[in-house]
Image: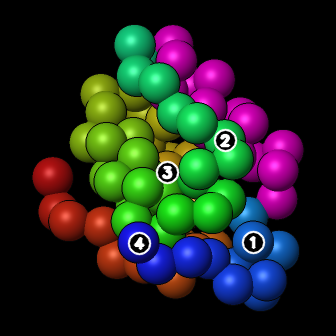
Amino acid sequence: MSVLTAPDVQGLPLVDIIDFKWLMAGAGLDVHVERMQADRAYACACLARGAASRVTLLQDTALRLAGTLGVTLPAH
């Protein structure tokens, strides 16, 4: 497990993570906010699932958060 560093966490404002969590919940997918902040691999997996969604707002939010985190998501 790779842990997010302080600059990574600062790059992911809590309100954005919570917005992402609720968008994912609307798509039937669970997201653990604290784990998103602490576990880079988990965050990347969640963001990839969000980016693969059929919901445009969820896709956009996942891509924006991935950009903030500095990760490249797999093409869907």
Q: Is residue 64 left or right of residue 28?
A: right
Q: What element carries label 3?
A: helix
Which residue is rendered at x = 52% and y = 18% of the image?
25
x%, y% of residue 19? 71, 35
Say which amino acid is labelled 3.
Answer: Ala
| Residue, disc 1 | 9
Q: Nearer the viewer, residue 20 or 30?
A: 30
Q: Distance between the residues labelled 4 and 3?
A: 21 Å
Which circle marks residue 33 in the picture? 2
Q: Is mark 1 on a helix, strand or loop?
A: helix
- Stretch in magenta: 13-26
Magenta region includes residue 18:
yes
| Residue, disc 3 | 62
Tell me the chief SS of the magenta region.
Answer: helix
Of mark 2 and mark 1, the one earlier in the sequence is: 1
Dot in front, 3 or 2 = 2
* 3 and 2 marks in contact (CB < 8 Å): no
Q: How far apart are marks 4 and 1 (CA)?
A: 15 Å
Say which amino acid is labelled 4.
Answer: Met
* 2 and 1 marks in contact (CB < 8 Å): no
Mark 2, other Cα within 10 Å: few <14 / some 14–19 / many ≥20: some
Q: Distance between the residues labelled 3 and 1?
A: 15 Å
Q: In this view, does 50 lie to the left or right of 75?
A: right
Of mark 4 and mark 3, the one earlier in the sequence is: 4
Q: What element carries label 2?
A: helix
Residue ranking furthest to the front:
1
x%, y% of residue 18? 73, 36
x%, y% of residue 71? 43, 78
Of mark 3 and mark 2, the one earlier in the sequence is: 2
x%, y% of residue 72? 34, 77
Which circle marks residue 1 in the picture? 4
Q: What element carries label 4?
A: loop
